[in-house]
Every structure is written in C-alpha cells, then in structure tokens.
Amino acid sequence: MERQFKHLVTERKTRLDGTTAEYECEGLVVEPGKRAILRYVIDRARQVGDVELRPGVVTIAHYWVDRPYNAYHWLDRTRTVGLYISIADRTVIEATNVSYRDLVVDALLRPSGAVDILDEDELPPDLEPGARKTIADALEALITNGRRLCAEIERETRNVLRT
C-alpha cells in the first residue's frame, strides 16, 4: 500500500570507490521495498551537459528497487528543465532512507525523447561484469523508451505535486 509522507528522507549514494554522499530530502511518496519520490531544492548553480541549473530549481527524484536507474526531474516552477537519469543498482527504499550504488554513467533525457549519455569515459576498467550488464541494460531501456519514460516521470511528478 502506498504511504504518503511529508518528512525528511535521507538519500544515500554510494560510489564505486565506496565513498558516500547523503542528501536530506522531503519524502513525498515512500513505499518501502518498492519505490520513492523525494523533493529537493537546488541550493547552488550547476551545469549538467548543456543544462544550466540555478538555485531554486526543484528536483523531484524517483527511485525504484526494480529498475537500474533513478530519475531526477528538474523543474523551474512548472517547466521541465530536464530529466537526469543516474544508472544505479542495489537500491533500497525504507521509510526514512533511500540508498543505492551509483554506477557512474548518467543520461540527460529530454522531453523530446533525445538522450545524452554522460560520464561513460569515467567507468573504471576493472568494473565487475554484473555492473557492466546493469549499465548496458539501463542504456538500452533509456534509448529505446526515452520518450515513454519522460512522459511517465512527468505524469508521476504532476500527480504527487497535486496532493
């Protein structure tokens, strides 16, 4: 059963080298063991590919335990700036924590369905075969179903922001 929260949830990203980063987010929808939708407001300007993110841009982050990626929907008020897809595995969703292993490769997904693959050149040469397969499967899904994924994320974001 879906449980809606308006409380802090910690997002914990573990990098391949074992280091971690944690972010405090607002939990919008948390279904332990299944999926989560979190909200985070960007506090400093950043550049991702050709997308400029200014302070105040809202990130609606979508996580699933059964997908090889997380999706970060960037909104400038109500306008979609872009969708940032972080390829990941080992996703665990609990009531107050979302954790995953970041597999380095990311994608910038446009509402048109266009996909820009980022950071592939940063993969370590000794990456285990299982992680390489996860990355390949995720990239195939993003390239073949990018437009559908954009529509799904935008719909889910609109739904959760209405409640």
Image: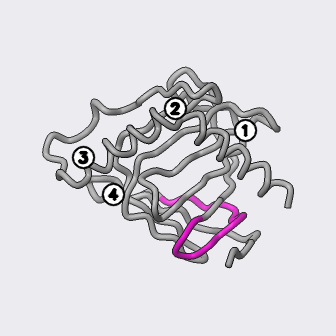
Q: Of circles 4 and 1, which is in front?
A: 1
**Residue 66: percent from the left, percent from the top?**
46, 62
- SS state under label 4: loop
Q: Is residue 140 left or right of residue 36?
A: left
Tag 4–tag 2 contact (CB < 8 Å): no
Placement of 40 over or under 100, stated as above or below: above
Mark 3, residue position: 132
| Amino acid tagged 3 | Arg
Disc number for residue 75 = 1
Image: 96 above or below 101: below
Crowding at dot 3, Cα within 10 Å, few <14 / some 14-19 / many 20+, comes out as: few
Distance from label 4 to label 3 (Cα)?
20 Å
Residue beneath the point at 47% across and 65% down: 65
Q: CA distance from mark 3 to mark 2?
A: 19 Å
Query: Which residue in the rendered view is the most extreme toward the top?
Result: 50
Per the model, the C-alpha gap separating discs 3 and 1 is 31 Å
Residue 47 position by quadrant: top right
- Label 1 element class: strand
Residue on which the image places disc 2: 108
**Which three-letter amino acid code belongs to the residue tagged 2?**
Leu
Please give the residue where the numbered disc 4 appears in the rendered image.
19
144 inside magenta stretch: no
Question: For the residue marked with disc 1, what is the amino acid?
Answer: Leu
- Magenta highlight range: 22-35
Residue 17 horizontal side relative to residue 144, left or right: left
Q: Quadrant of the C terminus?
A: bottom right
Q: Are marks 3 and 1 in contact (CB under 8 Å)?
A: no
Give the Cα separation between the discs numbered 4 and 2: 24 Å
Q: Quadrant of the N terminus?
A: bottom right
